[in-house]
Image (cartoon, coloured by chain):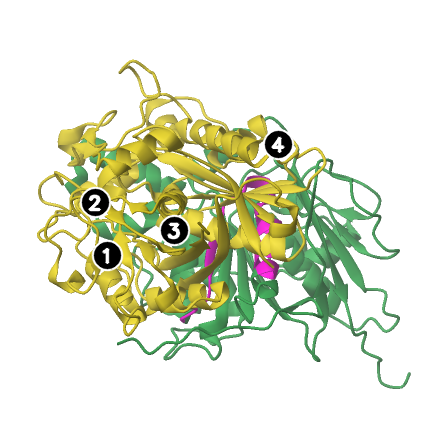
Chain colours: A yellow, B green
Amino acid sequence: MRVAITGGEMLTCLGDTAATLTALAKGADGSGPLRFYDTDRINVTRGYHIEDGDGGGDEPLLRTGRWLAACVRGAVRQAGIDPSVQRVSVVVGTGLRELRAVERWALDGVPVRRRDLHFDAAVREVLPEAVEVLTVSNACSAAGHALALAQDLLAAGEADAVVAAGCDAMSESMLTMMGRVVDAPTPALQPFQEGRAGVLLGEGAAAVVLQRAEDAHGTWLAELLGTGLSCDAHHETAPDVAGIVAAMRDAHERAGVRPQDVGLVLAHGTGTALNDPTEAAALGEVFAGAGTGPLVTGIKGSVGHTSGSAALMSLLVAAEALRTGSVPATAGLRTPIAEAAGLRLVTGEPAACDARVAQVNAFGFGGVNAVSVIRVDG
Amino acid sequence: MSTRSTETSTPPAGGVAVTAHCVHVPGAGDGPEAAAPAGDAAARAVLAAAEPACGPDQAHTVLGRKGLLFKEPATRLALCAVHRALGLPPGRLAEPLPGAGSTAVVVSSNLGNVQTVRDVAATMRAGSAHDVSPLNGPNASSNVIASVIAIRYGFTGPNLMVCSGATSGLDAVRLGSLLLHGGRARRVVVVGVEPDDEVAAALAGLREDPAPAGGLRAAAACLVLEPRGPGTDLLLGPVRHHARPDDHPQPAAGALRLVPPGAGGPSAVDVSAHLGDTYGALGVLQLALAASWLTVGDHPDGERRSALVTCGDAEDGYASVRLGRVRVPVPAGRA
């Protein structure tokens, strides 16, 4: 069964889909001073915030759900599906849910409702007819998992269209754990960069609409060939080459492609000490013998680590790169780590690319891996 | 060089079977009188399936002592339910289970890590990030329960954490079935679990409809799902979402009816009225109880043939699923 991506929308620190794609092409860095937190105590000073139009005032409540709703609305509108006559399911991937609201409630006395923790109510604000809204909390690869489940729901005939989405805002507890493991605050997120300092959080949301090819009569953003999933079962926070390789091979098999068919990889590329060499090793292993190998780039130097929405943001960037033939450079990367010497990393300027097939990597805490493969025909 | 290969699986043409199950609700297995009043025969028959279960502080009696440091109560209860459902002897495994490479994990929990989230932020505010133990780091991520299960038993199949509110338990069952249908696993370990700590209990009460009496109850349950095979006893139907609690086809005559919190009806069993609010654990817990009810004891006339389970609430909507007994054993002397 062929699956079409017929609508897509994202919201990043760089703006909506169009603004984000334009800024990425120019190598933009969307980071800024960390807002809302005591930076001395939390030991994190920078992040990639979304401006909510709050005029620099108090932190707005339940921001994640609003970003999610805006993206779901945009994706559904672009796809032109009619939820009143079609069975539309929604799978939301998220790392931190609305745990920020739990922190504000528990520590600052700001009211919250039990139902605010997941995204049923937020999605139904813009898609009241949805058959179901499933919240899958799969850390930094959550949107990749949502994409896999969405395709499986279509394949099983359990829905006529599925919205796969991802979303996350920062949380005080996650920022604390990031500040805990560094001596000095991380100054910048630099994927695959020699001497990189670590990760910074981004925020935002993204959503795509999937339909069976025979039902997709409008413009396709891309064809979703398949998503591979695996779990390292190795360590709660450290990634593992074997698990990541397994997800990539599962993705290629499901997509019906060989490594040499893949011309572009949107890397997970978090800029941490552990992720980047592990991801580079896995790419080296999977693409060994596949000719020159794919171009590799990553967007987290521009938009931060957006956790639950990261996979879908990368996917929308990959689709645009295949469509335009221009791959944005990896912001923050000048001198790659030795482990990545064999990768064709895009640095400095955008790279020309005539590939038709791209791979999107997403790996999360707990060793949860999701790798998607898309195709765009010129 | 990694040596692991991708294991692919064949979708289950014949349906999805429940091949093992466990109810792990501390305090609920201390005799039927602990769980349901004497006058409610139906509830007593269902809750009789709850065996004695240790609390999170005693999890080492099931799991062994190693590897439990900084594991939250919900993670410990979930591990106990999995360990018992798999029929494993007490203690840590020496090697991964057979078939672990094609086993997926799907966990449902809404409140598993909210106490840790509060505590981490509070500790930082009182001092600095460096006052927090790095061993608490994994617990800040909501999927910690699912990943800890995978690590302990070596389950390298897809690993999902479902946090969908009141329907979350049956959503996990739905996604577990979907992983089998999608050929992503040959076996799926599905767990529903909630803790009863102070933060979780307070949060669980922030709702419009009345909470079940007794408040939030620490509870875990586990189902093992596999493609239907020759030895299949219990066959799982599709999970359906619906807006009203009774908006589903009528159960077959004699079927066990497990209803969502506060819903009544003739011969319906509301386990939440007896156990308390188990929220994200409920759908899995109901199915595990139904699986026991369907298979425990000698019922020569086959009166225990199916169950209809519904979880959910007015805020999140409802989800339902049927569980049917495929083979009704013919007792000796009647053949």
Chain of the residue under the numbered disc 4 shown in the image: B
- State the CA–CA distance, disc 4 to disc 1: 40 Å
Do the residues under discs 1 and 3 have CB atoms within 8 angstroms? no
Do the residues under discs 4 and 2 have CB atoms within 8 angstroms? no
Q: Amino acid at mark 2?
A: Val
Do the residues under discs 3 and 2 have CB atoms within 8 angstroms? no
- Closest to the observer: B163 or A367? A367
- First of labels 3, 2 by sequence position: 3
Chain of the residue under the numbered disc 1 shown in the image: A
Q: Quadrant of the N terminus of chain A?
A: bottom right
Which residue is under mark 3? A141
Q: Which residues are magenta?
A: B154-178
Q: Nearer the viewer, mark 4 or mark 1?
A: 1
Locate residue B204 relative to residue A216 in the image: left or right. left
Q: Is residue B294 magenta?
A: no
Do the residues under discs 1 and 2 have CB atoms within 8 angstroms? yes
Which residue is under mark 1? A275
- First of labels 1, 3 by sequence position: 3
Place of residue B251 in the rendered image (x, y in percent of width and height, measured from the top left): 83, 52
Q: Residue at x 63, y 28 (%)?
A: B209
Residue B315's tag is 4
> Within 10 angstroms of label 2, few (less than 14), some, or many (20 or more) residues?
many
Locate residue B184 relative to residue A24 in the image: left or right. right
Q: Secondary structure at mark 2?
A: loop
Chain of the residue under the numbered disc 3 shown in the image: A
| A352 up-or-down from A344: above or below | above
- State the CA–CA distance, disc 3 to disc 2: 15 Å
Residue A199's tag is 2
Q: Is residue B172 magenta?
A: yes
Q: Secondary structure at mark 4?
A: loop
Do the dots labelled 4 and 3 sit on one chain?
no
